[in-house]
Amino acid sequence: MVDTLINSLTKAGMRLTSTRVAICNYLAGSQDHPTAAQIYAALKPDYPSLSLATVYNTLDVLVNAGAVNVLGQIGDGNVHFDPDTHPHINLACLKCHEIVDFTSQHTVEMEEIIRKESGYQIVGSRMVHYGICPACQESQNSEPTA
Amino acid sequence: MVDTLINSLTKAGMRLTSTRVAICNYLAGSQDHPTAAQIYAALKPDYPSLSLATVYNTLDVLVNAGAVNVLGQIGDGNVHFDPDTHPHINLACLKCHEIVDFTSQHTVEMEEIIRKESGYQIVGSRMVHYGICPACQESQNSEPTA
DNA sequence: TTATTTATTTATAATCATTATATATTTAGA
DNA sequence: TCTAAATATATAATGATTATAAATAAATAA
């Protein structure tokens, strides 16, 4: 998992600097869909000299290499990234801003079809369905109507 | 098509003002994936008093009603919207920033499965694969290597 | 190892899409 | 028409992202 990310950097001809490796490690370790700011905040304690620009730059390289997907915003004003590039749908809650994965055989087959038939040189994908998660639907019902 | 959009506004309890209707008409008429700025620029000549804020506000209402999908950015720094909410994949080119639709039976079935099985109250989706389109791959080959 | 070159990081400033706010306008209904 | 509420406008503010220049680190050669 980390290997995949690090391989992408070397294949792209990038040097394996400590910060880049740290960012790869963070991405590989998280089952999350982090934002640039989240990654920065998480690594800053261990890498006090880390700059937010470096996080953006490294993410950019990884995204262009196809090792990380950009999911975009989910109502919270922050672009979320997905280190899991296996075909799957991301279910994003517009209320609590949680993102969970959803997979079916269709996802996998569709990915194949697109790569085979579209003629596009696919770099990455952004498969998101947004709405209200079950938990937030609950709390919606229990709250008084405005 | 326009009806769907306008219905969404009325169902959401919004008044049918001339600018809102104009934006709906533009969205319905375009086979495109416009940005807020594009819509503003297109309507400004006919609606000189139109404000960019109104475009954003109206889009926001339509998105929350599920009548328009937010595709996000595709490398051009602008959020693109999709008035076509039928299940389909959007193929975005990172070079020319064109977006074309791609449909297969899997898309339709997956949509159903998600709505049935996820437990989410789905508002909209953002099904994008980004990469290099056939035409830009061509021009890449014919250009001298940097 | 040291010098040299190049890539990278950092720190900071700049950009610009988007959002918020206050005022003006429009709409719906009495 | 008049009144109240909703909406649009104009503008300012916000804040994520990008660009820039200087500092640092890595790779290579001597």
Image (spheres, coloured by chain):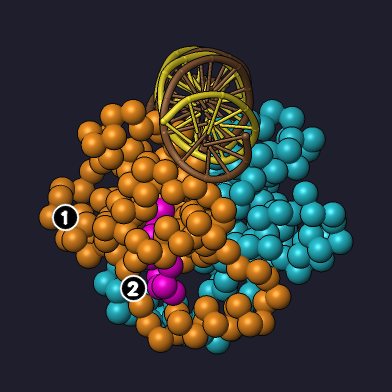
Chain colours: A orange, B cyan, C yellow, D brown
| In the displayed structure image, the side of residue B48 where residue C26 appears, left or right | left
Task: Say the numbered circle drawn on residue A102.
Answer: 2
Front in this rendered view, residue A50 or B52: A50
Instruction: Give the magenta range.
Output: A81-92
For the N terminus of chain B, the quadrant is bottom right
Front in this rendered view, residue B99 or B55: B99
Task: Say the numbered circle drawn on residue A139.
Answer: 1
Q: Position of residue C22 (x, y in %)?
A: 44, 13
Front in this rendered view, residue A39 or A77: A39
Residue at the image point whose x is 22% and y is 34% from the top:
A45
Q: How many marks?
A: 2
Q: Where is C13 relative to B15, above or below? A: above
Residue at the image point whose x is 22% and y is 57% from the top:
A136
| In the displayed structure image, the side of residue C17 where residue B140 appears, left or right | right
Q: Amino acid at mark 2?
A: Phe
Residue A112 appears in the figure:
yes
